[in-house]
Amino acid sequence: MREIVLAALAMVVISIGANFALKEAGFSAEEQTTGQAVRLDD
């Protein structure tokens, strides 16, 4: 049971870290799919 909990915790930590890293690197879906002709509200 301990291994399952640790695996789930690792999955959450990796997911949050990857999300943060990709946003900081400019690979978010919003930045990749918008051009100068598209206006998105903040």
Image (cartoon, rainbow, N blue to C red):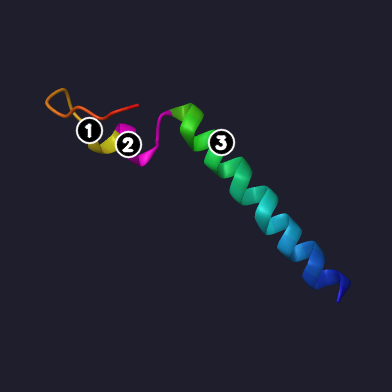
Residues at marks 2 and 3, CA–CA distance in whole angstroms? 14 Å
x, y percentage for residue 36? 16, 22
x, y percentage for residue 18? 56, 43
* Callout 2 touching callout 1 (CB < 8 Å): yes
In this rendering, the answer to whether 15 lies above or below 4 is above
Q: Amino acid at mark 3?
A: Phe
Q: Residue furthest top?
A: 36
Q: Residue furthest front?
A: 41
Residues at marks 2 and 1, CA–CA distance in whole angstroms? 6 Å
Q: Which mark is residue 23?
A: none
Q: Residue furthest right?
A: 2
Q: Amino acid at mark 2?
A: Glu
* SS for callout 1: loop
Q: Amino acid at mark 1?
A: Thr
> Based on the displayed image, in which of its 4 quarters is residue 42 positioned?
top left
x, y percentage for residue 11? 67, 58
The residue drawn where x is 50% and y is 28% is: 24
Q: Is residue 38 magenta?
A: no
Which residue is label 1 attached to? Answer: 34
Magenta stretch in the rendered image: 26-31
* SS for callout 3: helix
In this rendering, the answer to whether 24 lies above or below 11 is above
Which residue is label 2 attached to? Answer: 30
Which residue is label 3 attached to? Answer: 20
**Foreground pick, 3 / 30:** 30
